[in-house]
Amino acid sequence: MKISVIIKKLSNPRVRRRLKIALSVYGVAIILGVLGKMIYDVGYFNAQALENQKNAKLHIVTHSVPVLTMELAQRLVSGALKEDPAHPKTVVTQIIDNNDKLSTIVIENNNQKKVAWIIDLRLFFSADLFNEEGYNLTLGIERQHNINHADY
């Protein structure tokens, strides 16, 4: 009996139209939800693949770039100052900032410490270095590490 009541109510044209509209709205919402989920998943996986590729390149680049060690810094300083590498007069005492482009080191000669710079692990210099605002980076590092400003 209850099924016949439901069938009787569904036979009404007004109820049929409302039912079709409701089912259409639910169907469109489900399709939009599934489509949105698919678009999100594709974007997420593409972004993840791009990030993995970027990390792989970064991993290769970081391992192929040589790292400045105390021994390498000492060889660069001794070679630039034309000193005997076995018995150098000027000794590298500390590497302050180990960067592959610009490294900051502290050198010592006759108990006087000085800040020096190594560019691209090739070029050594011990003069003052200024940034684009005109700030003396050498003087700032000397103050930060309590190194007396001495010329030798």
Image (cartoon, grey):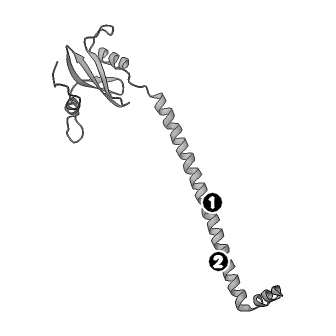
Q: Is residue 80 visible?
A: no
Q: Residues within 10 Å of mark 1 (few under 14, many from 20)?
A: few
Does 119 sit above or below residue 57?
above
First in sequence, mark 1 or 2: give its number. Answer: 2
Q: Position of residue 9 (x, y in %)?
A: 76, 90
| Residue occupying the point 60% across, 60% down | 39
Q: Is residue 58 left or right of residue 20?
A: left
The relative height of residue 74 versus residue 32 in the rendered view (above or below) is above
Number of marks present in the image shown? 2
Q: Secondary structure at mark 1?
A: helix
**Foreground residue among 34 and 85:** 34
Q: Check disc 2: other Cα within 10 Å, few if <14, some if 14-19, many if 20+.
A: few
Residue 38, numbered label: 1
Would you name the residue on which mark 2 appears? Answer: 25
Residue at 63% x, 72% y is 29
Observer-nearest residue: 113 or 1? 1
Q: Quadrant of the N terminus?
A: bottom right
Q: Amino acid at mark 2?
A: Val
Secondary element type, mark 2? helix
